Amino acid sequence: MSDCIFCKIAAGDIPATLAYQDDQCVAFHDIQPKAPVHLLVIPRRHIASLLEVEAADAPLLGHLLAVAARLAREHGLTAGYKTQINTGHAGGQEVFHLHIHVLGQPQ
């Protein structure tokens, strides 16, 4: 989607402080962190929200969660962390490109 800021980050058109990237996803530091560690894990393919996810997307969602867990370990969140997916306006979603928040305090 041409006007999606997260699509532009995934494409490298807008700079971000990347924490991870592969052919399926990109992870970067949130520009308005709500915790000492606040990362966003996004699919490269535009999916507006969980409301658009279909059964065929299960492998991608599993990969996003595995990347979130890997990044949590790499950022010292071994005592625990929060993952969060906001869905829709009423669910607090502000950027309509599926993303997983990884939030925590390093130990």
Image: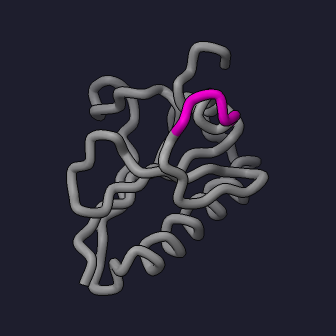
At a point 42% along the width and 28% down the height, the residue shown is: 95
At a point 61% along the width and 50% down the height, the residue shown is: 26
Q: Position of residue 61 (x, y in %)?
A: 62, 55
Could one spot residue 51 in this view of the protein? no
Q: Position of residue 65 (x, y in %)?
A: 54, 64
Q: Is residue 75 above or below residue 8?
A: below
Left or right of residue 93: residue 69: right
- Please name whichever residue, 14 or 85, is drawn nearer the observer in this view of the structure: 14
Q: Position of residue 101 (x, y in %)?
A: 39, 52
Look at the image and tell me in which quarter the N terminus lies.
Answer: top right
Left or right of residue 78: residue 18: right
- The magenta region covers 11-15
Q: Does the magenta portion include 12?
A: yes
Chief SS of the magenta region: loop
Could one spot residue 75 in this view of the protein? yes
> Residue 13's image quarter?
top right
